[in-house]
Every structure is written in C-alpha cells, then in structure tokens.
Image: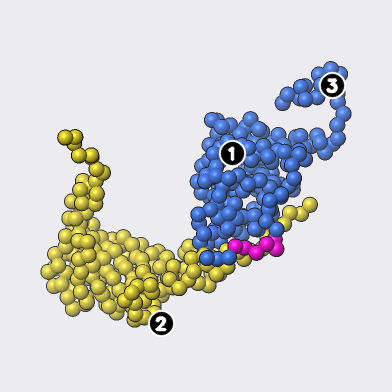
Amino acid sequence: MGLEQLIPSLAGDGFFTTQVNKLIAWGRKNSIWPYPFGTACCAIEFMATASSRYDLARFGAEVVRFSPRQSDLIVVAGRVTLKMMPVLTQIYSQVAEPKWVISMGACASTGGVFNTYTQIQGVDQFIPVDVYVPGCPPRPESLIDGVLKIQQIIDGQAKRHEFTRPSEMIPMEAN
Amino acid sequence: MPDAPKLPPTHDTHPKAARVQKENEIDHGLLSRKLGHLIKSIERPFGQTVLKVDRQHTRTVLETLAHDPELSFSMITDITAVDNLRREDFEPARRYTVIHIVYSLRHGKRLRLETDLPEHDPRIASTAGLFKGGPWGEREVYDMFGIEFTGHPDLRRVLMPDYYEHFPLRKDYPLTGLGERDNFVRAEEVE
C-alpha cells in the first residue's frame, strides 16, 4: 500500500501516531465492496471495469457483492423504472451504514433519452447520491474516476451529496 | 465508366425476400370458400394478406384457421393492438384495432386478422384454449390498451405495476405520464 512512503516514521521506528477515524477511513476507502444495481448497458461497462483489463482491484474495490447487507457502495447502473424504484429504495435501506451511492450514466442520473411515463427521471430524487458518472454508457475510466471520488469522500477530502436534488425540488414540467 | 456502387439489399432484393413473398402468397379463393360468410373483406396491403373480421366472429375465424387441415394456421405469432384516435378518418365505433398474426407451420403461410373495437366497449373474445401463447399477448394488450379479453383465465397487468391506473399506449394518455414517475417515498440516510 506504499505506507512507508506516506508515513516516513513507519519505516524507521516501526510505529506512528494518527487518529482512529483517519485509520478507519483509510481502511474503508481501500476496501470498498460495491453492489452493482445493474439494469441496463451501464452494467456491462461495470463488468468491464471490474475485470482484468481495467482492474478495479487496483483500488481495492474488486469484491463485488450481490447482497446489499455485505456492501458499502451501490452503483446504480442503468434505467430505473416505476416497478424497479421501490426495489432500489429497499436495497438502499438494507445496506449497512456507512454507505455511498454512485449514479452511473445518463439514465440513472436524469432519465437519459427515456422521457416516458415509466422511467424515473433521476434516482437522486428518491435516494441520496454521492457521485454522478456521466456518459451513455460511461467508459470504464470514468467509473474508476467515480470510485476514486468516493475514496476522496470517505477520506474527508470531498463533500457528500453535493449535487443531490433537494427533496422539495419540483420535478421538471411534463411536455 | 466505373461500376455502379454496390448497394445493400432491400426488402425485395434480399435473398430472403423470395421466401417472405412465398409466405404471403395465400389462395384467396380457399380463404373465401372456408370463411366467406364470417369475414368482412380480404385485403392485400404490401403483398400481405389481411382478413377484416367483426368481433363476434374473430374466435370462430381463428378456430377455423387453426383446425382446418387445408389452412392449419396453428401458431400465433403475436397479438397486438392499435389506437386509431389520431387518424384523420377516426370514428368512435372503431377506436381500437386488435391484430392477430397467425402462421401455418404445415404450409409455411402467414396471415393477419384485424378486428375493430368501439371506444365505449373495447371487448373481444380471448384465444385461450386455442393457442397456448395467446393469453400472454392478450395480457400485454390489456395492460397497454385496456382491451378486455372475455374468457381469459388470468387477465392481469403484465408489464406495468398492479397499482397503475391508466393504459399507457392509449393515444389520449400523455407520453410522460400523469406524475406516477415522480411519486415515490424518498429514502433518507440515517446518520
């Protein structure tokens, strides 16, 4: 983990001082367990990101869990419909605290090109989102950048829910 | 002079076009002999064969098509519908058109049945018991257009959630819905 370079005293005397929450955050950010809420083509890009060519394991996030109770990060990858939104809300509430959410791609973030009766126009209306990854679908590099942003949030270097829509915001007028 | 550019095949120059054309070549004399008293007309748009039927005869026509050995249209390809509301020649007596597409595995022929339904009473006989795949298509048509299939064993919504109140493919229903998609309980983080 390159700890010796980061903390010079560790290489010398073999001990260092820090704060407990910083130590915990360091552990958390390097062992994110993502839960892929994959409903469309963004999930294919997620698979590419997690597998060997792009290798999300370099950032400690390779343990993809298919149970929300074992994961820290929900990656909402794809379209969310009327029938799927209650499922996503329930899965979000099943993830143990602390938890983070990536809204991956145009459909999850805004509804994308699907401005129809059954398509949720952005999951951030109903669950808090930390990082939005743009693209249709996003390239694996974009998703890796999103995971790095989550690491910064865990570390305390970036703010949470900075761009999540407030609950009192009125949805866009139907046209 | 250079050669003419090689164009991709179209619907009539594609190698499979001849086969499709053969599928559509149906002996109209045979059809009118077997079904003449039950159907309104036989049409040939784009070389395809379409039977126009009144709704009280749809089930009988389908039974004859399926069971007659000279016809034996035993496979239902699709059941779908059209809302005619925005047509220039719209009249409430034929608001919806239910379309049955049947295929004859024995003879390799394809046939379309069109049944007009009135606006105030969109109701038609189900194909349950005749085609095994029929009730699935009927559930979808019910879900999207609200057309009732009498005699259907289990007429419920199949794509939209059960609490949904509208029939979204009707032309008087707005594309973006009536606010159903914005109406969910927001999950908040507990910290």
SS of the residue under disc 2: loop
Q: Is residue B96 visible?
A: no
SS of the residue under disc 3: helix
Q: Which mark is residue A9?
A: 3
**Residue B167 percent location from the top left of the image:** 47, 70
Disc 1: CA contacts within 10 A as few (<14), some (14-19) or many (>=20)? some
Looking at the image, residue B143 sits to the left or right of residue A149; the answer is left
Identity, as a three-letter code, of the amino acid under mark 3: Ser
Q: Is residue A80 above or below residue B40?
A: above
Looking at the image, residue A133 sits to the left or right of residue B69; the answer is right
The residue pinned by badge 2 equals: B120
Q: Quadrant of residue B130?
A: bottom left
Identity, as a three-letter code, of the amino acid under mark 1: Ser
Please, which chain is the residue tagged with disc 3 on?
A: A
**Residue A142 percent location from the top left of the image:** 59, 39
Chain letter for the yellow colouring in the rendering: B
